[in-house]
Image (tube, rainbow, N blue to C red):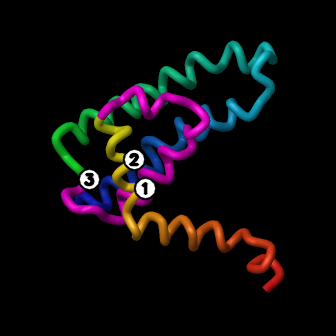
Amino acid sequence: MQVFTWMFAALNSVEPYLANLAELLGAPANASWTVERRPALEDTALKRLHDVDAWLAGRDYLAGSFSVADILMTTVLRLLDATDLVERFAALSAYKTRCMARPAFRKALTDQVALYSPVAASA
């Protein structure tokens, strides 16, 4: 049951807030609307990251053993790779590194990227 809970949390309680910030990071940094909007988006993202970090304290994975929930959450965390926000949280940063090193995560990422390759697109 915890696997499903964390799958939904990754996609509904964490991703929207991290994605909003990641999208803003792709906008012109000196535009007035990005300067005004960034603090609120970053604050909300940091709160979500803090919550996941707190859960991970003393745990290697979200639901006990490595699962699809960890693949989803790690994929969501990667939205902020252009920042240092995840790295501000020791447990969360170690978790992301640990998950990305897993063969199942690497395979899932490779399979996902392959869907968008020019060869796959022409098939």
| Label 1: few (<14), some (14–19) or many (≥20) C-alpha neighbours in 10 Å | some
| Residue 116 in which image quadrant | bottom right
- Residue lying at 44% horizontally and 26% vertically, measured from the top left: 46
- Residue lying at 44% horizontally and 64% vertically, measured from the top left: 105
- Residue lying at 67% horizontally and 73% vertically, measured from the top left: 115
Question: Is residue 72 located in the magenta-colored stretch of the structure?
Answer: yes
Q: Which residues are magenta?
A: 61-90
Q: Which label belongs to residue 61?
A: 3
Label 1 element class: helix
* Residue type pointed to by label 3: Tyr
Q: Position of residue 39 (x, y in %)?
A: 58, 16
- CA gap between label 2 and label 1 equals 6 Å
Q: Position of residue 64 (x, y in %)?
A: 19, 57
Q: Is residue 81 visible?
A: yes
Viewer-side residue, 98 vs 46: 98
Viewer-side residue, 14 vs 111: 111
Q: Position of residue 112 (x, y in %)?
A: 59, 68
* Residue type pointed to by label 2: Lys
* Residue type pointed to by label 1: Met
Tag 2 near tag 3, CB within 8 Å? no
- The disc, 1 or 3, on the residue closer to the chain's N-terminal end is 3
The quarter of the image holding the C terminus is bottom right
Q: Is residue 31 left or right of residue 93?
A: right
Reading the image, the residue beneath label 1 is 100
Tag 2 near tag 1, CB within 8 Å? yes
